[in-house]
Image: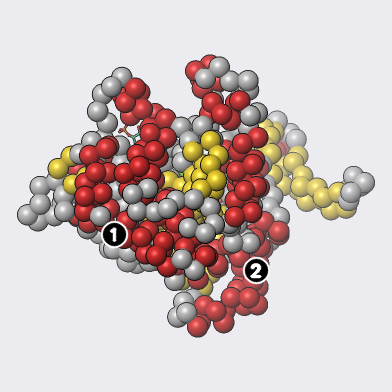
Amino acid sequence: MKTPLVEMDGDEMTRVLWQWIKEILILPHVDLKTEYYDLGLVNRDKTDDQVTVESAEATKKYGVAVKCATITPNAQRVEEYNLKKMWKSPNGTIRRILDGTVFRAPILAKGITSYVPGWTKPIVLARHAYGDIYNSVEEKVEKGCKAYLTVCDHEGNEIRRQLIHDFEGGEGIVQGVHNVDKSISAFARSCFNYALDCSLSVWFGAKDTISKTYDHRFKDIFNGIYEAEYKAKFEKAGLYFIYTLIDDVVARVMRSDGGMLWVCKNYDGDVMSDMVATAYGSLGMMSSVLVSPDGKYEFEAAHGTVTRHYYKHLKGEETSTNSVATIWAWTGALAKRGELDGNEELTAFAKKLEKTTLDTIESGYMTGDLIPLFKREGITPVKLNSKEFLHAIAKLL
Ligand code: NAP
Ligand code: MG
């Protein structure tokens, strides 16, 4: 390797898997170079969460990071780890610094069939991670009151006002949401870049017929950027971009065989990513990557730190935790590093490790979560523990 990967270590069961994946699958084959940041909760607390900021800055510098799942502390974690304070979500901090979009894709193995039989190719989902109801203000409104939408200049003088509703007939609720052109534009470019990278056409849906200013702005920005910056590149690659109503997109996705980038506004992405992940089988088989508009990549697993398995592990009990998504975080990062550095062997190794992992599962050797999903004629699936699964891949590799 020429350039180091930014390595962001994490917590609990995924921290255990992290070490084993390196030892068993990567270090025997790769002269691994990483710049190591320990994002485990203990070290985040010790460094007043500076380590998270530094790891994101390093990602800006080097361009490719691989991240282990981390605990987002809540009140119970503050007590459990005796924390100085309830630190923010590391993913949120990294996303703010890199200003990125998260892309999630199912990892498909033969024998593990989607609940939607037609979906034979992965549906990759891109979720806008800024604004809308996630940064909203809301009020309960008393009977007899009126609610207005007002816009003021920077001195606070009202320049426009619209009645939202006259609550003369009874009490009710009101909500104010916003978005900004800069974020929507960055989102559009991230999506188009990612789609070109992965050879996917782009489907985007919103509700511009009803939301003639708000959702229409998303449509206009996407169309404008596509026409001006991406259309020629897409056509050359044999790809396309469609914008249509969100309900039409949902219907088309159901009828499709997958294989597109489905771009979603924040709320749609929140809801649809759970539907898509569940339809493809297991959280352990979902890869995730954060891509910034200027082309920096942070690869991670889509699941959490698998706390329940970790407590079993601490008691010395056997676990059967699926490491596929975490392996994909490593292979994604290694392949991208190889691509950027012109290191073909490194990229080839990453692809080989992915194929071998799938071959292992497809030949019937897997972790417990996949056993009930696996159906392949002539093969009775064998449940392996966390470490045995990695050794089975290593043997085949
Ligand atoms: P989780 O770690 O994703 O696990 C929830 C359940 O899903 C597990 O108990 C397990 O079910 C199943 N599961 C998830 N990943 C699996 C895998 N690789 N192999 C087998 N089964 C798997 O979610 P959580 O328990 O809600 O959260 C735990 C911690 O993770 C929290 O502190 C949260 O803050 C953090 N988190 C981090 C990230 C991130 O860093 N990206 C994302 C989400 C959550 P069974 O118990 O039924 O086997
Ligand atoms: Mg959700």
- Any part of residue 166 in sight: yes
Residue at coordinates 51% horizontally, 82% vertically from top-left?
A: 235
- Number of disc labels: 2
**Circle 1 — which element?**
helix
Query: Which of the two discs, 2 and 1, labels the residue nearer the N terminus?
Result: 2
The residue that mark 2 highlights is 220
Task: Check disc 1 and give the amino acid type.
Answer: Lys
Residue at coordinates 46% horizontally, 66% vertically from top-left?
A: 343
Spatial CA span between label 2 and label 1: 40 Å
Task: Check disc 2 and give the amino acid type.
Answer: Asp
The residue that mark 1 highlights is 355
Q: Residue 207: where, in percent of width, then height? A: 56, 60
Residue at coordinates 22% horizontally, 56% vertically from top-left?
A: 359
Q: Are marks 2 and 1 in contact (CB under 8 Å)?
A: no
Seen from the viewer's position, the closer of residues 237 and 39 is 39
Left or right of 321, for residue 110: left
Left or right of 259, for residue 60: right
At label 1, counting other C-alpha atoms closer than 10 Å, the crowd grade (few under 14, some 14-19, many 20 or more) is some
In the image, residue 68 above or below residue 74:
below
**Circle 2 — which element?**
helix
Q: Ligand 2: does it lie within 8 Å of the C-beta at label 2?
A: no
Residue at coordinates 88% horizontally, 51% vertically from top-left?
A: 153
